[in-house]
Image (cartoon, grey):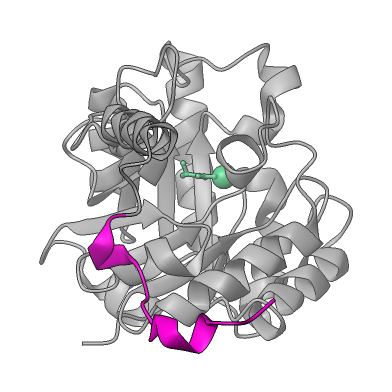
Amino acid sequence: MKQTAVTFRQAKGQRKLAMLTAYDATIARLMDDHVDAVLVGDSLGMVMLGRPDTLSVTMDQMIHHCAAVSRGLTRPLLVCDMPFMSYHLSPQQACANAGRLVQEGRAQAVKLEGGRHFCPQVEAIVQASIPVMGHLGLTPQSLHSMGGYKVQGRGREAAQALLDDARALEQAGVFAIVLECVPAPLAALVSRSVGVPTIGIGAGPDCDGQVLVWQDMLGMVDGLSPKFVKHYAELGTAMRQAFQTYADEVRAGTFPAAEHTYGMDEKDLEKLY
Ligand code: KIV
Ligand code: NA
């Protein structure tokens, strides 16, 4: 069945929601039968474009990748991130840019980072009939003001603030809320306290769904990965082995073999010069 923001919202309490990121049509096609929603995350700045953070990602980049993902999807809900500074200035700016993600990127919903301060933006986009997903906890676009990537919501005041933000977002009309790097007991409390699904990443098992970056969950990212990343395959290792074997065979002349090669009647080559 085709998933929509409506079916996604209604899943709360009925079934758990599985979401993954994607940035291109080939990967989207591979996920098509298997997840409820696909997110074109602004993590594309890091995993696709090699940037150190998400801050430099542009609207045009998001649209380019979202449109590519849309061509690979038939069933899951397609959600696209609003990049840094594409919704911060005003509800009008937020609405215009959300509209571009839908019209040019073929997104079926948008996601933006932040709590009560961004409720006017959420309301304006929802008014324009574009479903909005919230994002609380570790919000990577706030890297500099958070003082780094760290667990959010620890301590009584921070926990209350996160809970208030979740309630404010629900009131503003979001259909779901991502909780990133939030202690599991707080994520569980937020999940019980709002009527929309919570989608966790590093937020424990009691969220209504989960999301992961696909390169992370397939073991393709080098270096230290956060605690919440589970590797469902070691594709990074498998790919390096394949690249090495290919290079070895090319150098040895064993690839291509007969079965990879087109023939012809060699008489047709006689007396050619
Ligand atoms: O950009 C992204 O990939 C995200 C998810 C990790 C939630 O926002
Ligand atoms: Na993001």
- The location of residue 155, given as percent across then percent down, is 43, 10
The residue that appears at 19% across and 36% down in the rendered structure is 233
Which quarter of the rendered picture does the N terminus lie within? bottom left
The residue drawn where x is 75% and y is 46% is: 57
Q: How many marks?
A: 0
Residue projecting furthest to the left: 14
264 drawn magenta = yes
Looking at this view, is 105 or 114 the one in front? 105
- Answer yes or no: is residue 44 visible: yes
Front-lying residue, 55 or 146: 55
Return the residue nearer the eye: 174 or 242. Answer: 242
Quarter assignment of residue 207: top left
Residue 218, percent from left and from top: 29, 38
> What percent of the width, then of the height, locates residue 86?
81, 56
x%, y% of residue 220? 38, 32
Q: Is residue 261 one of those drawn in magenta? A: yes
Residue positioned 68% across, 29% down in the render: 53
Vertical comparison of 137 with 191: above or below: above
- Residue 194 appearing in the image: no
| Rendered-image quadrant of the C terminus | bottom right
Residue at the image point whose x is 32% and y is 41% from the top: 200
Seen in the picture, residue 269 relative to 187 is either above or below; the reply is below
Q: Is residue 81 left or right of residue 264?
A: right
Q: Measured along the vertical axis of the image, is residue 209 above or below residue 237?
A: below
Apparent side of residue 171 relative to residue 190 in the rendered image (left or right) = right
Please give left or right for residue 43 compared with residue 266 in the image: right
In the rendered structure, which segment of residues is drawn in magenta? 257-273
